[in-house]
């Protein structure tokens, strides 16, 4: 889906190129149950719910304006299998055992407790994908998983540049580089 397809506000959004990589790393199937923590505008949440159309999706978001944007996007795309919880994770993660795919797009300083909630409660076979702009977040997530013998861990860094066609001369405009940490239980 294109970024322009979503109702936007001043809430951060995972851009479409990064979203495509995140969704690929999650390996979502139609029957998966998908949780998006730090859901922002809900762009990953919406696409995840569409891919897991026979399963269910849950978005957890602390920012009240973002929760309203997610609800507007749910209505716009007529999503039936998506629930939104207004809260700061790990609050709202009490049904973690019912989910097998997890995206952490924002943790508000609770990354370790969010990851521990997932690793302790999720089904044996699950995938966790974390995005990080901040180096400290990337290091925290990577260090947590690299020492776990029951996870295959991958870290990639993505940098996306765009040419804005309406601006002359054509110039590449850089988006923030993003770290993507994937932890697949084994």
Image: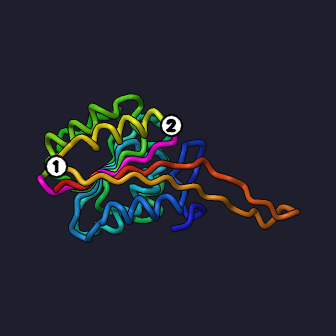
Of the pair 106 and 172, the residue shown nearer to us: 172
Residue drawn at the location 43% of the way across and 40% of the way down: 138
Position of 38 relative to 128 (above/below): above
In-image side of 64 versus 125 (left or right): right
Q: Nearer the viewer, residue 122 or 159?
A: 159
Residue 180: x and y in percent read: 43, 51
Relative image position of residue 179 (x, y in whole percent): 47, 48
Q: How many marks?
A: 2
The image shows residue 138, relative to residue 109, as above or below, that is below
Residue found 30% across the figure and 66% down from its top: 27
Numbered disc 2: secondary structure: loop
| Farthest top residue in view | 109
| Horizontal side of residue 77 vs 87, given as left or right | right
**Which range is magenta?**
124-134
Q: Residue at x 87, y 63 (%)?
A: 169
Residue behind mark 2: 134
The residue carrying mark 1 is 150
Measuring from the top left, give residue 110's x and y in whole percent.
34, 30
């Amino acid at each position: 889906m294109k970024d322009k397809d979503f109702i936007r506000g001043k809430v951060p959004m995972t851009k479409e190129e990064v979203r495509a990589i995140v969704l690929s790393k999650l390996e979502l199937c139609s029957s998966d149950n998908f949780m998006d923590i730090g859901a922002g505008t809900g762009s990953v949440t919406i696409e995840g719910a569409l891919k897991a159309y026979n399963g269910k999706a849950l978005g957890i978001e602390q920012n009240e304006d973002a929760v309203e944007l997610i609800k507007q996007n749910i209505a716009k795309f007529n999503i039936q299998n998506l629930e939104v919880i207004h809260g700061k994770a790990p609050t709202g993660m009490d049904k973690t055992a019912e989910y097998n795919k997890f995206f952490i797009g924002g943790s508000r300083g609770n990354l370790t407790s969010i990851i521990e909630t997932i690793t302790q409660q999720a089904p044996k076979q699950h995938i966790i994908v974390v995005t990080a702009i901040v180096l400290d977040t990337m290091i925290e997530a990577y260090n947590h998983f690299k020492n776990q013998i029951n996870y295959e861990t991958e870290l990639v860094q993505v940098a996306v540049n765009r040419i804005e066609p309406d601006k002359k001369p054509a110039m590449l405009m850089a988006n923030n580089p993003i770290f993507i940490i994937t932890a697949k239980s084994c």
